[in-house]
Amino acid sequence: MIVFALVQLVPGDPIRLALGTRFDQETYDALLARSGLDQPLVQQYFSWAGRALTGDLGVSFRSGETVTSQIAERLPATLTLAVASILVALVIAIPLGTLSALRPRSVVDRVATVLSQIGISVPEFWMAIVLILVFAGTLGWLPSGGYVPLTDDPVGWLRRLVMPAVVTGVVSGSVITRFVRSSVLEALGADHVRTAQAKGLTSRQVFTWHVLRNALLPLVTITGVQLAYLLSGVVVVEIVFSWPGLGQLALQAVQARDYPVLQGAILLFAVVFLVINLVVDLLYTAIDPRIRR
Amino acid sequence: MAVKDDVAVVGVPMMNGSATVEGFVPARDATVVTRLLAPEVRRQYDAALGLPVGTMLVGRRSEDTTCLRVAHAFEELSGGFPRPAGPLTSRHVRGPHGGDPRTCPVAGCVTGRSRSGNDHRPDLRGTGDRARVGCRTQQPSPPEVPVRRTRLLPLAAAAALLLTACGGGGESVDTGGGGGGGGEGGTLVAAVAAQPDQFDPHVTTAYPSFQVLENVYDTLVVPSAEDLTFEPSLATEWETSEDALTWTFTLREDVTFHDGSEFDSADVVYSYNRIIDEELSNSFRFANVESVAADGPQTVVITLSQPTPNLLERIGSFKGMAILPENAAEDIDLTTEANGTGPFQLESSDSSSTVLTAFEDYWGGAPSVGGVEFRYITEPAAALTALQNGEVQWTDNVPPQQIESLEGDDSVELQTTPSVDYWYMSMNYARAPFDNRDVRRAISFAIDREAVAEAAWFGAAQANQTAIPEDSFFYHDYAPFQPDPDQARQLLQQAGVQTPLTMGLMVTDEFPETVTAAQVIASQLEPIGIDVEIETLDFATWLDRQGQGDYDAFYLGWLGNLDPAAYYQEQHQTGGPNNYQGYSNPQVDQLLQQGATETDDAARKAAYDQAAEIIVDDVSYLYLYNPDVVQAWAPGLSGYQIRADKAINFESVELP
Amino acid sequence: MTGAPLPEPAPSPTATDAGVPSTQRAARPRWRETLGLLARNPTAAAAGLVLLAIVLIAVFDETLAPSGPNEISVEDRLQAPSLAHPFGTDDLGRDILSRVVLGAGVSLRVGFLAVAFALVVGSLIGLLAGFYGRWVDDVLMRFMDVLFAFPAVLLAIAVLAVRGPGAGNTALAIGVVYVPVFARVTRASVLGVREEVYVRASRSVGASDFRLLTRHVLPNAAPPIIVQTSISLAFAVLAEAALSFLGLGTQPPNPSWGLMLAEGRGFIDIAWWLAFFPGIAIFLTVLCFNLLGDGLRDVLDPRQRTLMAGGGR
């Protein structure tokens, strides 16, 4: 409902846009009738909602393809980038965050803090363009962008994935690093850790059993949030790297006022968000038995 | 010393927060308690507090918060730690021990966390506040996802439902995704700025679609690459009746569609009637057409309601008038598939590229490359990098500011040619004071077109006060406005306009040059007392407001014009379909009508020249410039010709 | 929420507020203490000073700018940094230094407005949800969840598409995106505070909800919100840049940093200074807001502070 209302609120006439600038009134009316946009909004909503429940998200105004097939076509690219970015992020964040929490105020900590602050503060597209100019342009090591399916060309797939994944991964990783640091720090300061130390456990035991496990909870949360963000499409990075993801699709749909695609995409994002929340909750119970009923 | 309710202390009844074990009396101390009660610890403890040795008390508290506060209070008392931020002073400590911690050494707090990390704290269960269970101190965590067990059930059900839907779509990708392999005989990779929206030539209006379709479909006639006059394609010759109302086209023989079927007149009749009957986006091009009929398999007769000298332009200027095989719309899905007569077949298309393969039976001879891949690269810097490092061999995504730097670059072959596009500013006749001819003329005098062209196109555009570019047969050299701020001010005064006058100028980020040019125009109008407020809109909103007449002025271009009727008629005829500004001049109407039906080229040109002069003088449109076409390709690429109408044809291209 | 009822303990009659003259002991005002502590953290102090300088630049932008930021002179376009134009000129020959100076005002205004909106609306929602719990919490937070489920960029684009572009609407769009964040942070913080002994005590002596909220809950729940404000300011400046990159933010010729960066990206390989200086300005501002946020966190969160000061356990 909200998805539908919000999309309809956006001004702009998809039919005029589809027709371009040269057309006559009969053509306009014919296309309007074909798209069903001449019907009352309430009726449009119920027919959309009814079909959406059966998995039919309608047909794009712009391309005439079904919305589900358009989304499905872009899902692999989005999933690839999101998963790769999260991996990059975690590979950066966990060691860096843990190290800096274990030695607060040390050189490692300071370097990690500065790096993560820089990662957060640099505009993504700026980093993206500079990477292209350096690694695709000057050095010529990597392709400048694009996407090929893993099944077609595994090497090309990987080479094209590196730069976008690094850009989004560095940004997400910087956010996660800060979380890892503060949650490990938090866990280290917790009373039960003090107790564990008092009990005479080795620092390794304390770390694995008492610190890491507790620090894992916020990490799971923030990773979930970041994954949801990445899956909903990193529009800017997708544009710069010509990455055919869902973010680009959604942006194009907004620009073309392609209501069915936009509604479909937003619905999907909402579902992704809910599923990730669900998974995060399930992981919570797995990690922390206290949450189990 | 207070310990928590779930830490066993010999002889002290405990209940672990649950009524079921109430009254349980442990027989052993917990390890922690044993250690705490060790003599050396007690001694240290008492000494630290400055108490007589042996005063340490052991009690138990079940309330976690109190326990904590006591701990804080203790820290405050005993150490040099700064006072915590909250009002955590001793008077807030309450409990069985009561009173001031100074007098009652209640300090320290031991929780019953076991090695497994399994903390049984039933007293906190069910408050639903995870933050207090796991970590007591609130991290100012940005997006935190709280645990909401009870809420998830209905949502999970909905998610499952929708996942089913998505899963169904996902399978089609797996089956269809493998087809994009490169062709044999060398594939040309072309970087284009955007993805085609669809492949039905009669429906789409998007340039990215036509970049592809140009190579897949044919029309009866085509504009020649050199001078854009019409030459044979699927029609080999044509003749016009005496009254100019009947055109007879003779069709090419031995032409086959990509699926192997023969091309004949029925296909032409079907294609044109599809556009007319279904009122598709190009149906306006057949406004004068009474009927399209076959006269034998190789002849098509078009009957007109009035002489239409530009009929060839109407049916051949671009692939929007493509010839499809009969019943194509029923036989295949034209939005994703294609069956044309052109040099390349549509092989596959996905969200990163469209792949064409050479059509061996093409009537003009098989193309020399094995195929073409149109790869979508939105970011110009990325497209150029891809060209320089050899990933692609051709691109039209070259912003004009790159021209200069690319001229000395050996890794790129850059070419420009004047286009048939023009850009203009238009003012709203329905809004005062822009309905006043003097005001419009004042603005026209204030604008330095050279500077606007230079700013927006870095010299790759020719300033022009009329629409038609210099290279065209219909070009008319007419330039009455030289930049003259004094005259502009005088005209404004004459019109009785009070300055500063505010003028909204609507531009769109769909065409970034409009945003750049608008800023230059704003700076040029400022000295004559006009405050330009630039409104950058996305194109959908822009078109909407244009249609509703909700603007003072807008800035846009007309692209791909081949005939003077396309340049002037729709835009300036009274009530014309694209006369958004509301211009109406009977003299212009009469001249435009004359031009539209005059079959003699010289007389036609005279009519349009005259109309153009009036349009320019009245400032129906404020014409600014004709830009160049800018394209770049790999050195050594041959057989490609850059065209003024921006049609991209790879029929005879050869890879380096 | 699992909606557990407030475990309302019977206030023990022994603990009387009467025994203590006033809950507000005559201590140093907390903000001064905070400032003092911040000053002792060199990174945060430096960040604060830089931010102060940026704000001053933003306030006195007109007087500080060496030339008119919108003065176009096509002949002088794309000049590399020189004495006349320390930051060079852009594609329309405008002085980049002047535009960066003026852009400070535009970018910061958008940032502050956005965060102010999110702060007021989000905190209020979070406060009510956290304090009253039950259905209030359910209704408000579920609405926040819906808002949060939208991808941020798309939500902002939608707001802008409905309201039209412009600085005010950009601020609103970014603000709307951050409302749920503030609501959550506030709620979580309030949940932690509302069960505190002093709140219960105050309630037991009959304080009204309003008094409880304003005198006890809000002040003590504030630290995470303050930290979040600083961090959100950083993100708001970045978000403004991203929206301008997509052509939806500030309207030209007004020089916001985001817009300059977006305009400069087409020139990044032939005239690096177009995008470099506004990029640095954004980077520096965002970095300082983040560092200040970290500093504030250290100071306002006693446990963290203890850990920091004590060097560990």
Image: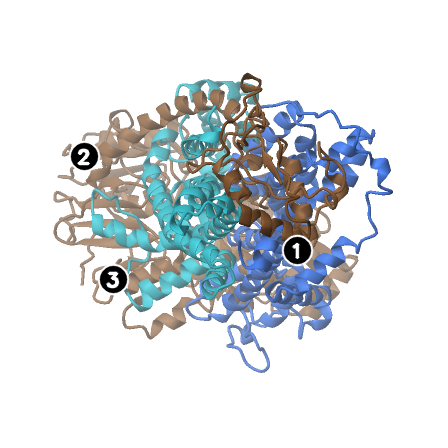
Q: Colour of chain B?
A: brown
Do badges 2 and 3 share one subunit?
yes
Residue B263's disc number = 2
Image quarter where the C terminus of chain B lies is: bottom left
Counting residues from the N terminus, which is met first, the one under dot 2 or under dot 3? Answer: 2
* Three-letter code for the amino acid on which mark 1 is drawn: Gly
Q: Of tags 2 and 3, which is closer to the observer?
A: 3
Q: Chain of mark 3?
A: B
In the image, residue A260 lies at what x, y percent? 45, 30
* Three-letter code for the amino acid on which mark 2 is drawn: Phe
Between the residue at mark 2 and the residue at mark 3, the CA separation in whole angstroms equals 39 Å
Pointer 1 residue: B79
Q: Could you tell whether A63 is left or right of A33 in the image?
A: left
Between the residue at mark 1 and the residue at mark 3, the CA separation in whole angstroms equals 69 Å
- The chain assigned the colour cyan in the figure is A
Counting residues from the N terminus, which is met first, the one under dot 1 or under dot 2? Answer: 1
> What is the secondary structure assignment of the residue under circle 2?
loop
Asked whether the viewer can see residue B16, the reply is yes
In the image, residue B198 lies at what x, y percent? 35, 38
Q: Could you tell whether B330 is left or right of B573 in the image?
A: left
Counting residues from the N terminus, which is met first, the one under dot 1 or under dot 3? Answer: 1
Q: Is residue A100 above or below residue B574?
A: below
